[in-house]
Amino acid sequence: MSLFTLFALAVALGTDAFSLCIGIGIAGVNRRQIALISLTVLIFHILMPLLGWYAGGFLGSKMGQAASIAGALLLLYLGGKMIWDTIKPGKDEGPRFVITNTGGLLLLSASVSMDALSVGFTLGTQQVSLVLAAGVIGLVAGMMTFAGLTLGKYVGDWIGERAELVGGIILVGIGVKLFF
């Protein structure tokens, strides 16, 4: 996997955090909260792909090409779901998620990192440097979280959905690329 593809993957994974954090930023956060949330999401986006990586590496050694195909299909599914969630009719806009304690912070970080767990599985079936992949994914997710929280203080809701749509398209594109 090229560095460009890895970076595109990291951006796609960071869009969940970015779009959600715009909403959190709109609800109101201070600098300390922005730093804490960004750091926690960064850490989760490093740990989750590592967990998935080891599972994917194990399955890749046992299943060979079938594991690579399964990884590509997983990316296609995740990207398609992100796209569908953005464009589906009759979306229910629930209440904004506001972090009030450590549990909320961990829940937020885990929820926006679940895709990274699945992508870690896919990466485990590819020839990619573990340290590089986890580092790039974590750093990009942390920066996108920071950007989302900061922008949320100044910009309306409309950016969040568009970011998730773009992220879904990127994941689908990478999933298709893994087939070739």
Image (tube, grey):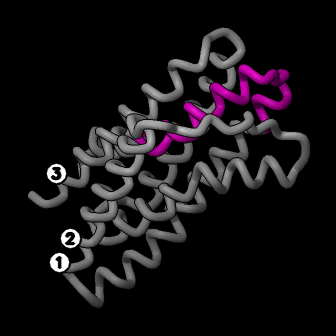
At a point 40% along the width and 39% down the height, the residue shown is: 88
Quarter of image, res 141: top right
Looking at the rendered structure, the kind of residue marked 1 is: Gln
- Residue hosting label 2: 69
* Residue lying furthest top: 154
Number of numbered labels in the structure image:
3
Residue 141 visible (yes or no): no
Element type at mark 2: helix
Query: At label 3, which amino acid type do we have?
Result: Lys
Which quarter of the figure is the C terminus placed in? bottom left
Disc 1, disc 2: CB below 8 Å? yes
Q: Which residues are magenta?
A: 11-36
Name the residue located 61 percent from the left edge and 13 percent from the top edge.
156
The local crowd at label 1, few if under 14, some if 14 to 19, many if 20 or more residues have their Cα within 10 Å, is few
In the image, what residue occupies the spot 20% across and 79% down? 66
Label 1 to label 3: alpha-carbon separation: 15 Å
The residue indicated by pointer 1 is 65
CA distance for labels 1 and 2: 6 Å
| Numbered tag placed on residue 132 in the rendering | none
Residue identified by numbered label 3: 177
